[in-house]
Image (tube, helix red, strand yellow):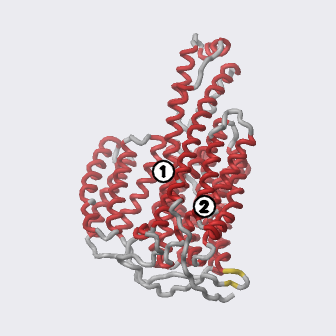
């Protein structure tokens, strides 16, 4: 089914009390859509930048705040990520209920104040708490901003506008390590949070002055059952894939989280399709199973262990949802009936593939540059910057071409270029010339501008204006989940390739190396024993370890051989993983074939200067 959706077949959103049509409006001499875009970009670039700028400061934070272990300090990043994912499903309802401008101002204020509080934090507990609050505000900013843009554009030049809107998504991951490294090395880690304060103040003033309240619906009831199934499902999925990189996909924690997420997601989908009785029935086995596993986890690991608390939380959610599910029909939290439109559905599938290829590679590239090539974090950020700058220039161009020729040829060209960039990355070795790396990055950057936002614009342009907020929540939720799953899968592939490559890479130490190894280890070392030691060390190492850059022993001959062997193993592993990314990218050509040129009418109104 490919016609433009104008109304779902079940409950509909009540008519807005103060709906204002702003497409083609003007603010003084300026087109309102560009004014709104500028205001929205101020907010979105903060939240995206904050997701990456903190990573480089983790070792400093761990030392300064006296964190007990890496698992403890990791919650500074994990808490922010989970909070962002948790609030996205309800953002569509909140936007419809309170209005785009009002909610945007609230979230900007919350994010800015939380950023200030993070900078003032005196211990790890305070920092994690305020990072969670920061994530709540940041998680809403992107879908709210997208809704504001959709209202302002009205279907005209959607690709070009969305291309500009997507620039921060690609610039921020490259700018984050550069700014973070500079702040930490030259000033203080607190500046990575304080930098948001002036930006937030400017964004608040600009939003107050220029944004128009375009949508507010009084009396819109919250789908509590949908909220209490969708939110924990998203959180469980995100936390499971985050833990999978260290615990493995078959660990009890990850499997349990995925099962809980699957049950909650199934109940959510049934409730959104107006089959609430069937959804409610799923809560009974979930309650019993979660309660039993919580008791078991408490007896085994302690009653305050995260696994036990998570299961008791799932049991409580299931119990609360039983009476909620028996209530009458309410407006669905997310309009899943939007998936009845073919272009929207295929675009969501394509978006899942694209974010896997993009954000997965964004994780692997810094690891390659630091572990294999020996660059520090600041040098890595500077080397990745041309890719982001190229993408920033290509995105508006790709959007304009999509508006003119339709998304299908533009997205297909972008996917082919992105795959070609992956093939080039798969040719990298320990001593590959720098121009090959830069060339692959520039090609990927240009490809990003042609495949990411044009596909999203094609989907959102198929949605009627009154459902734009719900569509924004859907797209942002899927992107958040897709990027997390994609990164986890690619990390799993890389770790598996490291294990395989250790046994396939030639290990033939000459006699001089064996003599040096015997001196270092204070015992006679044979070639077979040395190779076995290196293979065992590399196979069992994690990505947070030193697989790519073994510690120095003080013996130049021994260290030289170890570094060369480890570098060859890791380089081969990265090459195969990049090739896997290229294959995934080409699979995206299938959904791209079904994208249709957007068709959507819009109105216009003049605004006072």
Q: Position of residue 517 (x, y in %)?
A: 62, 16
- Judging depth in this view, the residue of 165 and 382 nearest the camera is 165
Q: Position of residue 21 (x, y in %)?
A: 56, 84
* Tag nearer the camera, 2 or 1: 2
Q: Residue at x 65, y 59 (%)?
A: 449
Q: Is residue 83 visible?
A: no
Q: Residue at x 68, y 48 (%)?
A: 441
Q: Position of residue 262 (x, y in %)?
A: 35, 54
- Give the distance between the C-alpha atoms of the residues marked 2 and 1, in whole angstroms: 27 Å
Task: Rate crowding at label 1 as few (under 14), some (14 to 19) or many (20 or more) other CA atoms within 10 Å.
Answer: many
**Location of residue 229 by image quarter:** bottom left
Q: Quadrant of the N terminus?
A: bottom left
Q: Residue at x 31, y 71 (%)?
A: 274
Give the answer, above or below, for where 223 lies relative to 290. below
Answer with left or right where residue 594 lies relative to residue 517.
Answer: left
- Judging depth in this view, the residue of 518 and 241 nearest the camera is 241
**Residue placed under numbered mark 1 in the picture:** 485
> Callout 1: helix, strand or loop?
helix
Answer with left or right where residue 323 lies relative to residue 210.
Answer: left
Q: Exactly how many numbered labels are in the figure?
A: 2
> Callout 2: helix, strand or loop?
helix
Q: Quadrant of the C terminus?
A: bottom right
**Residue placed under numbered mark 2 in the picture:** 409
Q: Is residue 415 visible?
A: yes
Give the answer, above or below, for where 543 lies relative to 237. above
Answer with left or right where residue 534 lies relative to residue 515.
Answer: left
Q: Position of residue 554 (x, y in %)?
A: 68, 22
Give the answer, above or below, for where 9 lies relative to 426. below
Task: Rate crowding at label 2 as few (under 14), some (14 to 19) or many (20 or more) other CA atoms within 10 Å.
Answer: some
Q: Residue at x 59, y 63 (%)?
A: 453
């Amino acid at each position: 089914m490919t016609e433009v959706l104008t109304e779902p077949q079940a409950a509909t959103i009540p008519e807005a009390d103060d709906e204002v049509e702003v497409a083609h409006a003007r603010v003084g001499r300026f087109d309102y859509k560009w004014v709104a875009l500028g205001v929205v970009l101020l907010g979105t670039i903060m939240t995206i930048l904050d997701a990456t700028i903190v990573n480089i400061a983790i070792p400093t934070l761990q030392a300064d705040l006296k964190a007990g272990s890496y698992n403890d300090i990791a919650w500074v990043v994990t808490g922010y990520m989970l909070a962002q994912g948790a609030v996205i499903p309800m953002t569509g309802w909140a936007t419809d209920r309170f209005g785009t401008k009002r909610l945007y101002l609230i979230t900007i204020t919350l994010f800015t104040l939380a950023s200030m509080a993070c900078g003032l934090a005196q211990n790890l507990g305070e920092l994690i708490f305020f990072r969670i609050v920061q994530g709540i505000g940041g998680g809403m900013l992107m879908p709210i901003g997208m809704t504001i843009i959709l209202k302002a554009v009205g279907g005209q030049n959607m690709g070009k506008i969305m291309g500009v809107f997507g620039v921060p998504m690609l610039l921020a991951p490259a700018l984050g390590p550069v700014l973070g490294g500079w702040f930490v090395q030259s000033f203080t880690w607190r500046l990575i949070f304080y930098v948001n304060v002036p930006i937030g103040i400017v964004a608040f003033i600009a939003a107050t002055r220029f944004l128009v309240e375009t949508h507010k619906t009084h009396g819109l009831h919250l789908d509590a059952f949908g909220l209490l199934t969708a939110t924990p499902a998203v959180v469980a999925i995100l936390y499971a894939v985050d833990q999978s990189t260290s615990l493995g996909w078959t660990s009890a924690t990850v499997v349990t989280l995925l099962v809980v997420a699957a049950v909650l997601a199934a109940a959510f989908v049934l409730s959104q399709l107006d089959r609430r009785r069937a959804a409610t029935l799923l809560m009974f086995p979930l309650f019993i199973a979660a309660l039993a596993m919580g008791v078991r986890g408490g007896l085994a690991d302690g009653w305050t262990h995260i696994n036990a608390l998570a299961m008791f939380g799932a049991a409580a959610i299931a119990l609360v949802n039983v009476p909620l599910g028996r209530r009458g029909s309410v407006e669905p939290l997310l309009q899943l009936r939007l998936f009845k439109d073919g272009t929207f559905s295929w675009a969501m599938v394509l978006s899942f593939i694209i974010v896997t290829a993009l954000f997965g590679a964004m994780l692997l590239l810094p690891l390659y540059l630091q572990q294999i090539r020996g660059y520090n974090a600041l040098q890595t950020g500077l080397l990745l910057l041309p890719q982001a700058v190229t993408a920033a220039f290509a995105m508006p161009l790709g959007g304009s071409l999509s508006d003119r020729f339709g998304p299908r040829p533009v997205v297909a060209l972008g996917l082919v270029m992105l795959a070609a960039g992956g093939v080039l990355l798969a040719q990298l070795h320990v001593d590959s010339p720098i121009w090959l790396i830069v060339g692959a990055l520039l090609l990927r950057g240009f490809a990003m501008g042609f495949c990411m936002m044009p596909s999203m614009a094609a989907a959102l342009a198929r949605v009627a204006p009154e459902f734009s907020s719900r569509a924004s929540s859907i797209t942002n939720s899927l992107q958040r989940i897709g990027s997390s799953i994609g990164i986890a899968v690619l990390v799993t592939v890389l770790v598996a390739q490291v294990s395989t490559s250790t046994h396939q890479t030639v290990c033939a130490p000459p006699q001089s190396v064996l003599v040096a190894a015997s001196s270092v280890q204070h015992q006679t070392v044979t070639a077979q024993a040395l190779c076995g030691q290196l293979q065992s060390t590399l196979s069992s190492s994690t990505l947070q370890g030193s697989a790519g850059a073994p510690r120095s022993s003080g013996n130049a001959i021994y260290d030289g051989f170890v570094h060369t062997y480890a570098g060859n193993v890791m380089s081969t592993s990265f090459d195969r993983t990049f090739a896997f990314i290229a294959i995934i990218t080409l699979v995206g050509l299938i959904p791209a074939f079904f994208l249709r040129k957007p068709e959507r009418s819009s109105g216009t109104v003049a605004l006072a200067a």
